[in-house]
Image: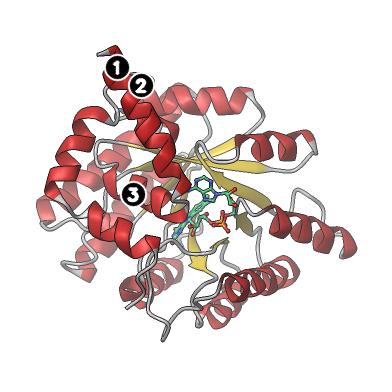
């Protein structure tokens, strides 16, 4: 099994003790360490972050954190939270765009109920011109996620899009399928630990595949989202779009809240569309640990923040 930082942080993310400790310190005050990556625990805090981003010329998508629910009650509660979130976005007058995970809506318990929960979200979303992006989780869920997405697509929902991961060997075929449907794809490198049988292991292979798929999406896709903080890939995307005379409003860049804010600002100043993925909610620990796993240097940042926080306590 792959034993890089992703695997270690994944194992740690399942520790009950760490979850308890992190919940206590991570978001306790405005300067707590998890706030660099998570907008807050409440809808109000998320909307405050959204307003701030909009004031700086950015677009946004809000993610009410949660995944892998174990009971139908939890899936129903998450569905209700998303409906409430759409109402809150409408009331606040900020952009209506949300991201969610199917295992949060019960995909791991019962597929049909998960589709029903998606419809419960897509209906009010459609009425309020809100776009709903389905995040992609680990490869155990890829088939099911695409299958649920296509079911909704066949039912004529068009305010829904999907994320695909360039580290998976299968993704070129999935990009072509989504392009043929006319579905909107967010391309990411992929955040989970995966075996070599399904995913490229070398960064150079992932990056090469990311660029190949970006070009396929720009040339043949529908308003693709290039979701990466990788400067070389961003430059290559701009160059390809310019060479093909693809206008900068025909695609968008996306980045995560709190990561490469300098680059986010530079893209906006350069006239490009930039959407920030804004996660919020109480179940922030697994998301937070994936961000640490991507860049172990972040651990130093967390430790420094913790020492600082405790010395002030
Ligand atoms: C909008 C958005 C949505 C996403 N949705 C999904 C999804 O649905 N499913 C999924 O599997 N993954 C998702 N991801 C995560 C993605 O798969 C990658 O794990 C993540 O974006 C890091 O990869 P990178 O493309 O930035 O490239 P990398 O090569 O990992 O990083 C490039 C540079 O970005 C900076 N950077 C990257 N990560 C961090 C970090 N954690 N902390 C500080 N700096 C960092 C560093 O400067 C690094 O050198 C999403 C990412 C974005 C931006």
Establish if 127 lies above or below 53: below
Where on the picture, by quarter, is residue 250? bottom right
Q: Badge 3, how many Cα within 10 Å: few under 14, some, many 20+?
A: many
Residue 101 at x, y = what percent?
Answer: 34, 56
Q: Is 114 on the left or on the right of 152, as rendered?
A: left
CB within 8 Å, label 2 to label 3:
no
Tag nearer the camera, 2 or 3: 2
Q: Is residue 266 visible?
A: yes
Q: What is the distance, in whole Å, between disc 2 and disc 1 at their CAs?
A: 5 Å
Residue 289 has which mark? Answer: 3
**Nearest the eye: 222 or 278:** 278
Q: Are marks 2 and 1 in contact (CB under 8 Å)?
A: yes
| Between discs 3 and 1, the one toward the N terminus | 3
Task: Please identify the quarter of the rendering in which residue 222 is found.
Answer: bottom right
Nearer the observer, 236 or 34: 34
Whole-percent x and y of residue 69? 18, 55
> Mark 2 to mark 3: distance in Å?
20 Å
Q: How many marks?
A: 3
Please report the residue visible at 12 percent of the width from the left and 48 percent of the height from the top: 16
Q: Where residue 216 appears, x then y in whole percent?
A: 69, 73
In the image, which disc is placed on residue 311?
1
Quadrant of the image containing the N terminus: bottom left
| 10 Å crowding of disc 2: few (<14), some (14-19), many (20+) | some
Q: Which residue appears at 45% of the width and 22% of the height?
A: 48
């Amino acid at each position: 099994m792959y034993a890089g930082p992703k695997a270690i942080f994944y194992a740690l993310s399942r520790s009950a003790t760490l979850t308890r400790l992190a919940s206590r310190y991570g978001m306790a005050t405005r300067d707590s360490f998890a706030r660099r990556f998570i907008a807050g625990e409440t809808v109000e805090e998320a909307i405050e972050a959204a307003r701030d981003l909009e004031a700086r010329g950015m677009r946004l998508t809000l993610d009410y954190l949660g995944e892998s629910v174990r009971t139908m009650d939890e899936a129903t509660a998450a569905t209700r939270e998303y409906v409430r979130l759409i109402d809150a976005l409408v009331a606040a007058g900020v952009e209506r765009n949300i991201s969610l995970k199917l295992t949060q809506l019960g995909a791991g318990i019962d597929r049909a109920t998960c589709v029903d929960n998606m419809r419960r979200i897509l209906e009010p979303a459609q009425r309020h011109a809100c776009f709903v992006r389905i995040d992609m989780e680990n490869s155990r869920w890829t088939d099911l996620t695409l299958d649920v997405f296509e079911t909704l697509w066949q039912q004529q929902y068009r305010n829904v899009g999907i994320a695909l991961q360039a580290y998976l060997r299968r993704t070129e075929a999935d990009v072509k399928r989504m392009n043929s449907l006319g579905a909107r794809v967010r391309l990411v490198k992929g955040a989970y630990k995966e075996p070599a049988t399904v995913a490229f292991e070398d960064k150079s292979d992932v990056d090469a595949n990311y660029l190949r798929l970006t070009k396929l999406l720009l040339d043949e896709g529908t308003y693709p989202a290039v979701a990466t903080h990788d400067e070389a890939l961003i430059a290559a995307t701009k160059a390809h779009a310019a060479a093909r005379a693809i206008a900068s409003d025909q695609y968008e860049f996306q980045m995560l809240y709190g990561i490469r804010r300098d680059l986010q600002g530079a893209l906006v100043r350069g006239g490009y569309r930039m959407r920030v993925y804004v996660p919020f909610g109480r179940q922030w620990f697994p998301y937070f640990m994936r961000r640490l796993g991507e860049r172990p240097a972040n651990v130093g940042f967390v430790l420094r923040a913790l020492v600082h926080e405790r010395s002030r306590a």
